[in-house]
């Protein structure tokens, strides 16, 4: 059975159409509210941005609500101003106070809301927030987000991704937490290393001071010798003129 050029062209067109359909279906699934960067160190402080793309062709995003986890409250949450947007920080009483830098914290930020701005179709906006102190005993933090459009549509990015499972239709932004980096000696950058550095610095400054003192003495002696030689030369020259 012979295959005509017309059949080949038809098959090619069908393949291109199928590929385009796959791309169009995959596009919206990947464009969701996310956190950037996606990783931070446990027990530290960090700045992350909530990246919000506009997924609609006929509406603009006008509001973003991000809910912070209450099982691991963060004592310090400071949003960075975003031009054209108003920010509202909601605090709530904690069922169990937490400690930070020796102080008891009885309330923490539970939600941050941005309004007043507009994300046009085909655009995205980032909303930076400084967070800390991040948990030391967790491997991730989940931030549930609500995205509101000017046509009153609300998209709820609240589904928690599960390891080994396909990505949910509306996944919540997830910040992965990794162990803090250790120094060359295998320590987490404690005070011992700092004290050792201080001692080495003191020793080095002592050596420098000793060397400077010795040099000053040598230069002083040389100066005296030169001065005496100059006086002797002057006296001898005076005697020769008298003779």
Image (cartoon, helix red, strand yellow):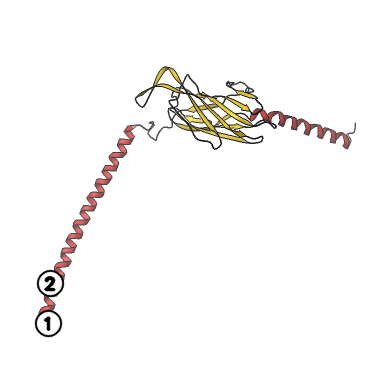
Task: Determine whether 234 is above or below 146 in the image.
Answer: below
* Disc 1 crowd, CA 10 A, few/some/many (<14, 14-19, 20+): few
Locate residue 191, reporting x and y percent: 33, 32
> Which quarter shows the C terminus?
bottom left
Name the residue tied to disc 1: 241
Task: Return the disc, 2 or 1, that comes first in the chain's sequence.
Answer: 2
Q: Residue 45 sits in which quadrant?
A: top left
Q: Residue at x 26, y 49 (%)?
A: 208
Locate residue 156, reporting x and y percent: 61, 23
In the rendered structure, the answer to whether residue 198 lies left or right of residue 233 reads right
Q: Residue at x 23, y 53 (%)?
A: 212
Name the residue tied to disc 2: 232
Q: Residue at x 35, y 24 (%)?
A: 103
> Which quarter shows the N terminus?
top right
Mark count:
2
Which secondary structure, mark 1? helix
Q: Residue at x 32, y 33 (%)?
A: 192
Farthest residue in the bottom direction? 243
Q: Residue 170 sits in which quadrant?
A: top right
């Amino acid at each position: 059975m012979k295959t005509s050029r017309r059949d080949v062209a038809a098959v090619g067109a069908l393949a291109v159409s199928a590929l385009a359909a796959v791309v169009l279906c995959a596009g919206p699934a990947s464009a969701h509210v996310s956190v950037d960067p996606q990783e931070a160190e446990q027990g530290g402080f960090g700045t992350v941005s909530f990246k919000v793309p506009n997924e609609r062709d006929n509406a603009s995003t006008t509001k973003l609500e991000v809910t912070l986890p209450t099982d691991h409250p963060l004592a310090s949450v400071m949003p960075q101003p975003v031009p054209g947007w108003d920010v509202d920080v909601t605090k709530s009483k904690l069922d169990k106070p937490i400690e930070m830098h020796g102080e008891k914290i009885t309330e923490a930020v539970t939600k941050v809301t941005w309004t007043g701005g507009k994300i046009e179709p085909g655009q995205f906006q980032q909303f930076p927030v400084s967070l800390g102190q991040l948990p030391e005993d967790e491997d991730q933090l989940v931030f549930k987000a609500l995205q509101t459009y000017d046509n009153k549509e609300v998209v709820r990015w609240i589904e928690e991704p599960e390891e080994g499972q396909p990505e949910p239709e509306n996944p919540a932004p997830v910040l992965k937490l990794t162990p803090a980096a250790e120094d060359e000696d295998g320590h987490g950058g404690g005070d011992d290393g700092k004290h050792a550095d201080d001692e080495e610095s003191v020793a080095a400054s002592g050596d420098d001071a000793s060397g400077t003192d010795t040099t000053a003495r040598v230069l002083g002696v040389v100066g005296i010798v030169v001065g005496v030689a100059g006086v002797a030369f002057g006296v001898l020259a005076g005697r020769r003129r008298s003779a």
